[in-house]
Amino acid sequence: MPKLLNEAAIEQYHRDGYYFPVRILDDDRIASCRGALERFEKDQGSPIHGAQRSKSHLLFKWVDDLMRDEKILDAVGDLIGPDLLCWNTLFWIKEAGSRSFVSWHQDLKYWGLDTSDLITVWLALSPATVESGCMRVLPGSHVGDLLPHADEYNDNNLLTRGQEISVQVDESKTVLMPLQPGEVSLHNVRLAHASGPNESPDRRIGLSLHYMPTATKQMVGEWDSAALVRGEDRYRHFNIAPRPERDLDPVTVAFHEEATKAVRDILFSDATRTRPTL
Ligand SMILES: O=C(O)CCC(=O)C(=O)O
């Protein structure tokens, strides 16, 4: 029996490669999460950037709590089963009026993981509207071979290598995924997706959480980590991430350094150059 999604939602996810919106957080929790993020940014004197964007559950207890949210895990469990790892938690912030964008891409191409069952849960912590640059997807593109990609290294592109699908994406077949704060979308790791600039007066703040079955293997990196968020890990393919006792817990901050370096090495493993700021 599914715990959260209904049969139609499950069927749509498997057929089209995505499903949205699902409400997860109420207004108080959204305000508390956004407040925690923005207090940290104010204290450090700059927006969250570079490696801080990645594996952020190791830096912030409130992100670790979000990653283990029962409602999110129920939705993910309805699609890929009861034993779940979270590989990454990644901030996607487009400042108000910024040119930041995300080119069309398929994540499985770059992550070194051997599963097609990975689900990205994209959580809106501010309005993700057409004006603020919400995500767009190409329905059904999770089926069949991955498309060819090229590295474009555009400074406004939020992707590490500016990776971009190098064949024409038929925009008339794409679907926009606007979300209210506190809602999530779910998309398959093979699905082609992109997003445009933020032309709104508010920041567009998204947190993506990448869940996969415990049977998943890392094929590129020698060392990789993941958090065990539900069920049992009978495979032990990943180093299990520790849980922070508080924000910036020195134990998990040290692990974060090692874990984000490993992810970075995986993402750039077959690239012709790296980007120092990421
Ligand atoms: O936030 C965006 O616009 C893109 C996010 C994305 O590419 C992802 O979550 O995989």
Image (spheres, rainbow, N blue to C red):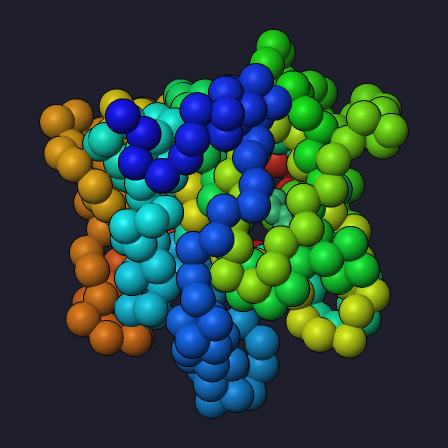
Provide residue 7's location: percent of width, then percent of height: 44, 24
Q: Residue at x 67, y 71 (%)?
A: 203
Q: Quadrant of the C terminus?
A: bottom right
Q: Quadrant of the N terminus?
A: top left
Q: Nearer the viewer, residue 114 or 197?
A: 197
Provide residue 248's location: percent of width, then percent of height: 30, 75
Quadrant of residue 100 within the rendered picture: bottom right
Quadrant of residue 256 within the rendered picture: bottom left
Q: Residue at x 43, y 62 (%)?
A: 25
Provide residue 277's location: percent of width, then percent of height: 60, 62
Q: Residue at x 23, y 75 (%)?
A: 246
Relative to 221, is 177 on the left or the right? right
Q: Nearer the viewer, residue 270 or 136?
A: 136
Provide residue 146's location: percent of width, then percent of height: 62, 18
Q: Residue at x 65, y 64 (%)?
A: 127
Q: Is residue 136 above or below residue 50?
A: above
Q: Is residue 78 visible?
A: yes
Q: Is residue 91 visible?
A: no
